[in-house]
Amino acid sequence: VSNCNDIKLSGLTPDLYLEKHINYILSYESKKDDYTYIMTEHLRISGMYWGLTALDITHNLHKIDKKEVLSFIKQCQHECGGIGASILHDPHLLHTLSAIQILCYYKALDTINVEKVVEYIKNRQKDDGSFEGDKWGEIDTRFSFCAIASLALLNRLNEVNIEKAVSFIKSCMNFDGGFGSKPGSESHAGLIYCCLGTLSITGHLHIVKADELGWWLAERQLPSGGLNGRPEKLPDVCYSWWVLASLKILGRLNWINTNKMINFILYCQDAETGGFSDRPGDMVDPFHTLFGLSALSLLGYTKADLKTINPTYCMPQYIMDEMNLKPDRLD
Ligand SMILES: COc1ccc(S(=O)(=O)N2Cc3cc(-c4ccc(C=O)o4)ccc3N(Cc3cncn3C)C[C@H]2Cc2ccc(O)cc2)cc1
Ligand SMILES: [Zn+2]
């Protein structure tokens, strides 16, 4: 049965236009009056994490003004300890994690009040072990990952109830071996990544049905070589990261056809502007640019010099080594 929800790729495999992607990210960070830049203020600090990580794995982090980044992050921390997407934006776990990830790159965790940010994260955990994204109470396994990854990077994992956090993740496991945002929610590749990341950091990967989940993840690959996030959906390059990082954690990355995957990712580049889009021909953005480059690194694409990326944290492996962080993997 041909899957109508796929795209046709013809012709040869494109090269990786590495210099164009580096210039795209550098110009994005500098064009502060650009429409897209202004329209993404609500995710600014996450956008900075995506841009800075893309620059680091392409050996260009030094081209960004460190003082400017650290001063911005410092201004985003609230009295309550939480960090917002931009100055005067409400604090949220999503942006708190992005800020901490960036500070690890600069070995500058003392830029923020660590005691207060730990208190903010602790206060997000509910009695059932789940985490709310902010004080408004939305529960999602994404926020479990943000909380656990943040605390692990701060070396303060013992501040929350790990057993209860893991039991909540377990309560979100579906019959197909996948995970959703809450108990009973449908399996989704992005949430599977968050749940596996949480289990990898807390050393509880043994609760996962690795073969069923590995099969579900490999089933995301379409004839085009691209991966989707759920059955019947269109392929999207950011799913390359969610699915491949999950398979890497499960020790089953070779269950995907690597060459067809690489080909799809390279077709998502914009040869004119630089950057990656969600699928060939769409508009590029820093989010898909990071995940396209990270997926290539994970797949061992050797035609370009990309640093190794850690599948659990989506941060350069050398940072995890320097911080002596060893998230679990099934090998
Ligand atoms: C363009 O529409 C959206 C929709 C959702 C979002 S999101 O913040 O909830 N988010 C991350 C995300 C970011 C971008 C983007 C555009 C420009 C920049 C500058 O840095 O970043 C684009 C999409 C996007 N999405 C939506 C998406 C991606 N692929 C398919 N879709 C529908 C993902 C979304 C959820 C998210 C994922 C990871 C993460 O660390 C944080 C949020 C952002 C823009
Ligand atoms: Zn996407």
Image: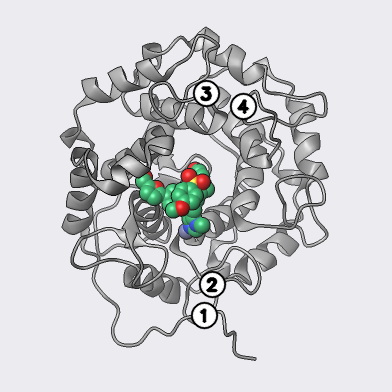
Contact, CB < 8 Å: mark 4 with mark 3?
Answer: yes
Q: Nearer the viewer, mark 1 or mark 3?
A: 3
Estimate how packed mark 2 is, as few (under 14), some (14 to 19) or many (20 or more) residues with alpha carbons within 10 Å: some
Q: CA distance from mark 1 to mark 4?
A: 37 Å
* Marker disc for residue 159: none
Which residue position is annotated with label 2? 234
Residue 194 screen position, x and y as percent: 61, 44
Which residue position is annotated with label 1? 6
Q: Amino acid at mark 4?
A: Asp
**Nearer the observer, 253 or 133:** 133
**Residue at 68 percent of width and 68 percent of height:** 215
> Could you say whether the residue bearing mark 3 is in a helix, strand or loop?
loop
Specify whether 178 is left or right of 4.
Answer: right
Residue 296 screen position, x and y as percent: 37, 60
Q: Is residue 311 visible?
A: no
Residue 42 screen position, x and y as percent: 43, 36
Which residue position is annotated with label 3? 91
Q: CA distance from mark 2 to mark 4?
A: 31 Å
Specify whether 300 is left or right of 312.
Answer: left
> Could you say whether the residue bearing mark 4 is in a helix, strand or loop?
loop
Q: CA distance from mark 4 to mark 3?
A: 7 Å
> Could you say whether the residue bearing mark 1 is in a helix, strand or loop?
loop
Badge 2 or badge 3: first in the primary sequence: 3
Which residue position is annotated with label 4? 134
Q: Is residue 84 visible?
A: yes
